[in-house]
Amino acid sequence: MEKTALRILILEDVPTDAELIEDSLRKAGVDFVRQSVDDRESFLESLAHFSPDIILSDYSLPGFDGEAALKIAREIAPEVPFIFVTGAVGEEFVVELLKSGATDVVLKHRLSRLSFCVKRAQEETEEKRIRRKAEEELRKAHQRLITVQEEERRSVARDLHDSLGSCLMAIKFGMESELDVAEKDQDSARTSRLAKLIGMVEEGFKETKRMQKQLRPPVLDDFGIVVAVQSLCRDFQVWYPSIHVETLIEIQEEDMPEGLKITIYRVLQEGLNNIAKHSGAKRAIVGLSKLDGAIHLLIEDRGKGFDFGQYKESRSESASMGIMGMRERTRLSGGTFSIDASEGKGTVIRASWPCRIPPPVKSRSCPEE
Ligand SMILES: Nc1ncnc2c1ncn2[C@@H]1O[C@H](COP(=O)(O)OP(=O)(O)OP(=O)(O)O)[C@@H](O)[C@H]1O
Ligand SMILES: [Mg+2]
């Protein structure tokens, strides 16, 4: 990659000091272009239009000061290194400036340090940029993985329905005709054998339906998230009658961004699985609401809870994926995820997403696919 000249913004009211700064950098072989400013307006203007790679600022200026400049820079351009180039100051003061967000402090009578500080700041910024890019790529890869996984699940669900489901249905019809014949022939041994086999095929068919639903709930595509959440809780109640589930839904279907629906469904699915598997609870609460410009999912149980701190520490050795998957799905869809759990006190999972995405056009297909 071709190296371009460093863009340096100098905030300095004494022209000779600005020249000294420039000289020291040129002598040290730093390739740069600069813009010098000496008041608030021109500093703001330069931040917006000159787009500096680095800011060198005096501490005290008439009508403006370095600390105010630092505050502005941290808000507008938080990634741009900000180095104070100032007259004599005490060590404690330097520490204070660094605490306020300055990258470094160089004294005017020791300008020989400046090029070193500039180069180091430049390298650190570049490292941060590379790290951020890598993190962004990782995030995108996770997102793609989840999308592909959902596609795959949808396709397996379709295959189960179209091939295995239809095939089992056909076998059942064929056997029922055979059963009619056996009954007419008063062949009791054959009748009972066929009845047993039909029962087994029916069980297989039910299991196929259950798997299909787990893989890709048709209700989500056909009726939306509100009905899908209610249906998931109802099914849970049937499968685990000893756990009473209270469902509180305070959101309209049209308030829910399309792309978020499958995420919410999967987080809830895993949350309920964990309640059934680990909590020993008699009561659980599922909430889905829109409040203060955000969508909130709550999965709470009054069961035995667990030591979440310890779980986080030992997680690297554990093979369990559920909580991590819930958190990743939430994070990747722009939400925040939290677990409040402690032994004997139950478990509360909260996931929230800002509703900045405009309401979708009514559609029956899943937008993420
Ligand atoms: N609602 C809950 N009540 C009590 N303990 C829980 C609850 N949810 C999770 N846990 C504890 O947290 C651990 C991690 O949960 P996680 O869902 O990540 O993994 P898992 O359910 O054990 O396995 P997986 O989800 O990968 O099949 C569980 O093993 C369990 O000890
Ligand atoms: Mg789990």
Image (cartoon, grey):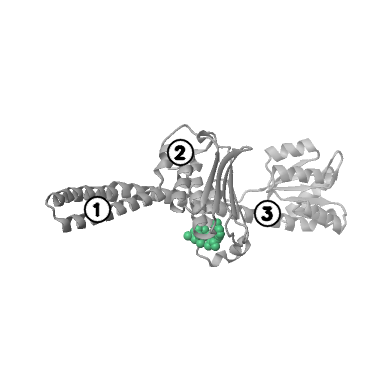
Q: What type is the residue that disc 1 sits on?
A: Ile
User: What residue is at 43 percent from the left and 41 percent from the top?
Assistant: 220
Label 1, label 3: how far apart the Cα atoms are: 74 Å
Dot label at residue 122: 3
Q: Earlier in the sequence, mark 1 or mark 3?
A: 3
Image coordinates of residue 172 in percent, x first then y, are 23, 50
Q: Earlier in the sequence, mark 1 or mark 2?
A: 1
Q: For the residue labelled by badge 2, is the local secondary structure a helix, a strand or a loop? A: loop
Image coordinates of residue 93 in percent, x first then y, are 85, 55
Query: Residue 311, located in which quarter of the rendered image?
Result: bottom right
Q: Residue furthest top?
A: 361
Residue tagged by mark 2? 224
Give 146 or 77, whichever is nearer the viewer: 146
Query: Which mark is in front, 1 or 2?
Result: 1
Residue tagged by mark 1? 198
Give 43 or 297, whichever is nearer the viewer: 297
From the viewer's perspective, is residue 124 above or below residue 261? Answer: below
Asked whether, in this view, residue 177 is left or right of residue 334, the answer is: left
Labels 1 & 2 near each other (Cβ < 8 A): no
